[in-house]
Every structure is written in C-alpha cells, then in structure tokens.
Amino acid sequence: MPEIVVAAESRSLTGKNENRRLRAKGLIPGVVYGTKQEGVAVAVSPKEIVAILRSASGENTLFDIDVKGGKKSKVILKEFQLEPVKGVLLHADFYEVALDKLLDVKVHVELHGVPVGVKVQGGVLDFVTRELEIECLPTDIPDKIDLDVSGLELGKHLRVSDLTLPPKIRMKTEPGVVIVHVVVPRAEEAAVVAEAAPVEGAAAAEPEVIKKGKVEGEADEKPEKPEKKEKK
C-alpha cells in the first residue's frame, strides 16, 4: 500500500470566526498531538481525511502529515467531529506515533458466514461487541478482526477468548466478553413465556354456562295456578 501524505498548514489564530474562515477556504481546523510536545494547530483538507476514514483501515490508518514550513510526522487520527445533520467533517485531531512504541487502538470485528443456528434452527444472530481493544506496533494495526460464525448453534455464543490473533497483537479486551450469539427470536420467546406463565392470583374457574337449556327427557313444568278462595 502506498504511503499516504496529508498536507497541512500551521495556524496561529483560533476560535469560531477563524474556523468559519478556514471552512470557507475548503479547509478544516485540526491539532497534531505529540508524545513530548504540546499540540500544534493546523488546517487540512477535509476531503483527504474523509478518504482516510473511508479506507479499509479507517481511523486506524497510519499516514504522514506534512506541515508546511515544519516537519513530516507519522500520525493516526485521534478524534474527529462531524456536523450532526449533514455529516460534514468539521474538525480532526491527530496523534503522532513512534513506530517502535506499542499503541492501544480499537479495531472493528467483521463476521463471516451464516450461523447454523440461524440457517437451520431458526434463531437470530445478535452482534453484541463490534469493537475490540488491542495493543501492537503502529505498523501492525490490522484493518479488522475476522470472526467465522458459521458453526454457531442456537443458544451458543463466541467470546473474546475464542479468537486467534497474530503473535504481534495482544488483546486488551477482557476474554470473557461476548462478541456474538444466536438467540431465539423475541416474538417467539415472548409467546412461549406468555403461554407457560399462569396469571397471578387467578383461580381455576369452571366453564361459564352461556345458555341453559332443557335436560333431555325432562317434561316442561307449568306453574300451578293459585287456588281461589270462596267468598263468604
């Protein structure tokens, strides 16, 4: 993969008005943070940063930032800010890295295959943990962590401890954390619970008689007429 170089301009002015002026020129504000120096305020092209974010390695991409009149540094994206409605990139911070120093980063998990618990047993795949924290050298940061879920059965799960990582990468996320499992569909589970659970406080009631009819073979009874009393 060819090296990525992002051109940057140093800036001395800060504040909302200056940021608006930069954006009007097609630039966004940013800060380069180093391990042994204070942050350096810069301005960069948002198109170049968006291209990095959309690459396979995303925000873990290792690239050079070349500050005009300054020096070129190896960096990764530290933080970035998006406009909440249109999703336009507004700000980006960079972290200078040393190639011989270990780095803590978060990497996305990518699932492969269709679980047998979904395909055959009618379950639903629940993707619980989508990012894992690892430690490695900057040049060893993987684009993603692959996980094959094709053998996963209904009611079973895969944890961090089930992963096999390259020897140069150390997992920082706890081994007991569940990454993915196959569960019973919620509607079906709710139906089973509702059918099995008795209504609290309800007594066993006899069937209600909707209409009472004659017993077969029973004669109709007519009410007796009251006896008349003779007048004296």
Image (tube, rainbow, N blue to C red):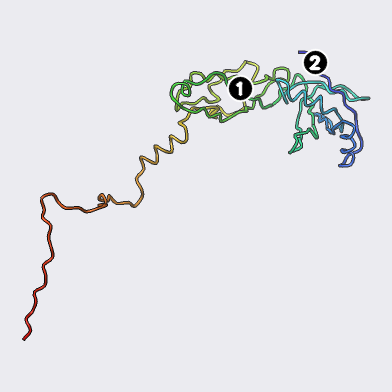
Picture quadrant of residue 108: top right
Q: Secondary structure at mark 2?
A: loop
Q: Secondary structure at mark 1?
A: strand
Q: Position of residue 139 (x, y in %)?
A: 73, 17
Which residue is labeled 1 in the image? 110
Residue at 43 percent of width and 35 percent of height? 189
Which residue is labeled 2 in the image? 3
Residue at 90 percent of width and 32 percent of height? 25
How many labels, in total? 2
Q: Position of residue 174 (x, y in %)?
A: 57, 29
For the residue carrying disc 1, how many other residues have a C-alpha within 10 Å: few (<14), some (14-19), or many (20+)?
Answer: few
The disc, 2 or 1, on the residue closer to the chain's N-terminal end is 2
Q: Nearer the viewer, residue 228 or 82?
A: 228
Quarter occupied by the N terminus: top right
For the residue carrying disc 2, how many other residues have a C-alpha within 10 Å: few (<14), some (14-19), or many (20+)?
Answer: few
Quarter occupied by the C terminus: bottom left
Q: Nearer the viewer, residue 191 or 11?
A: 191
Tag 2 near tag 1, CB within 8 Å = no
